[in-house]
């Protein structure tokens, strides 16, 4: 399998940065409820998305590296879709279309496309928490759409409590498609639910027979979580990707901010170099809120 081959090599895999913050603050595009998938509904929106991804693909191409494209479907699940006026059938089709449309942009033999899914609720705080079985049932239809469209894998981004992450993992396992689980952490390096990153990864692996292809950390600055990797424990090797925020602000501060904090690009790049020392299996390099292609280019320059 291409994904496993790339993960077992020494190659970096480039992915994108903060899709929604880039579209809103740099491109001036209004997104209802942060739902970038709605741009797939019209030619202008599709062109804006293609332009966004092409900037990151160029970073990968210039260095002869694989590119992993995460579909703009973080919000296209039942609850958020209903709020935006989409039926179950319409969501299924938009999730399939997101994969098929962007596959056409990937002409590298080592490129990957991932069906991206987000939490049922808010990305920064757990809110009402589902059981494992509830989460599995909730997310399985979106995962099925990604598989039918030919995604190489699915990625659950900004997971903030264990049960939802486990449910998604089991749904992907049932569908027979590789899955990546990406946890978000607070400034203390713990999940918003209070669970440590080590506990979340180890328990997810225990309950799913280590099904995830790998784990990631996203939507936090490396300064918030790098200290938890000062360890030689086995779970460290399960982390193969980082999509960090540019800003040093907490999630609460970011929620209240009306302007974009682009952070310090040099500091961010230096932090990724330190993460590379701490995470021996780090392969997938990208960004999250506040990062654009210039942040990722700076980071890649320091690592490649």
Image (tube, rainbow, N blue to C red):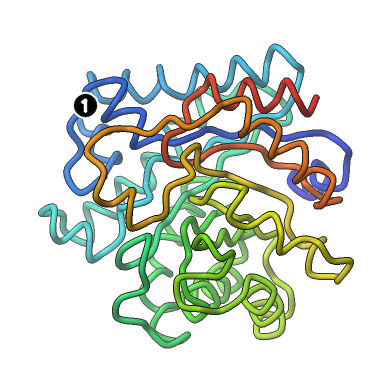
Q: Quadrant of residue 145?
A: bottom left
How many numbered marks does the figure carry? 1
Residue 283 vs residue 290, the one in the foreground:
290
Identify the residue position indicated by label 1 in the image.
29
The answer to whether residue 270 is left or right of residue 87 is: right
| Quadrant location of the C terminus in the rendered image | top right
The single residue placed furthest to the left in the displayed view is: 85
Query: Looking at the picture, how far across and down is residue 116, in whole percent?
Result: 46, 50
State whether residue 272 is above or below residue 162: above
Name the element at disc 1.
loop
Q: Quadrant of residue 141?
A: bottom left
Query: Looking at the picture, how far across and down is residue 274, in whole percent?
Result: 77, 42
Q: Residue at 84% x, 66% y: name it.
A: 231
Residue 275 vs residue 242, the one in the foreground:
275
Q: Quadrant of residue 92?
A: bottom left
Q: Residue at 53% x, 29% y: name it.
A: 264
Q: Residue at 61% x, 36% y: name it.
A: 68
The answer to whether residue 258 is left or right of residue 61 is: left
The answer to whether residue 238 is left or right of residue 55 is: right
Query: Looking at the picture, how far across and down is residue 69, in whole percent?
Result: 54, 35
State whether residue 130 is above or below residue 157: below
Q: Callout 1: few (<14), some (14-19), or many (20+) C-alpha neighbours within 10 Å? A: some
State whether residue 46 is above or below residue 276: above
The answer to whether residue 221 is left or right of residue 299 is: left
Query: Looking at the picture, how far across and down is residue 18, in whole percent?
Result: 44, 36
């Amino acid at each position: 399998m291409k994904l496993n081959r790339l993960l077992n090599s020494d190659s970096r895999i480039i992915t994108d940065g903060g899709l929604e913050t880039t579209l809103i603050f740099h491109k001036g595009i209004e997104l209802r409820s942060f739902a970038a998938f709605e741009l797939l509904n019209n030619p202008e929106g599709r062109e804006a998305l293609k332009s966004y991804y092409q900037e990151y693909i160029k970073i990968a191409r210039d260095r002869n590296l694989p590119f992993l494209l995460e579909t703009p479907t973080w919000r296209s699940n039942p609850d958020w879709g209903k709020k935006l006026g989409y039926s179950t059938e319409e969501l299924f089709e938009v999730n399939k279309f997101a994969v098929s449309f962007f596959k056409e942009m990937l002409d590298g033999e080592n490129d990957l496309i991932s069906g991206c899914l987000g939490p049922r609720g808010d990305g920064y705080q757990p809110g009402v928490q589902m059981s494992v079985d509830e989460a599995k049932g909730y997310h399985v239809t979106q995962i099925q759409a990604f598989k039918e469209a030919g995604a190489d894998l699915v990625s659950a981004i900004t997971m903030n409590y264990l049960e939802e992450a486990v449910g998604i993992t089991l749904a992907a396992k049932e569908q027979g498609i590789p899955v990546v689980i990406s946890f978000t952490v607070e400034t203390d390096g713990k999940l918003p639910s209070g669970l440590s990153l080590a506990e979340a990864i180890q328990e997810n692996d225990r309950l799913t027979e280590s099904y995830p292809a790998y784990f990631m950390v996203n939507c936090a600055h490396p300064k918030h979580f790098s200290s938890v990797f000062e360890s030689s424990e086995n779970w460290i090797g399960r982390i193969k990707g980082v999509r960090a925020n540019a800003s040093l602000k907490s999630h609460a501060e970011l929620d209240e901010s009306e302007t974009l904090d682009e952070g310090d690009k040099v500091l961010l790049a230096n932090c990724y170099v330190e993460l590379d020392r701490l995470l021996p299996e780090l392969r997938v390099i990208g960004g999250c809120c506040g990062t654009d292609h210039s942040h990722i280019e700076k980071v890649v320059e320091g690592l490649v």
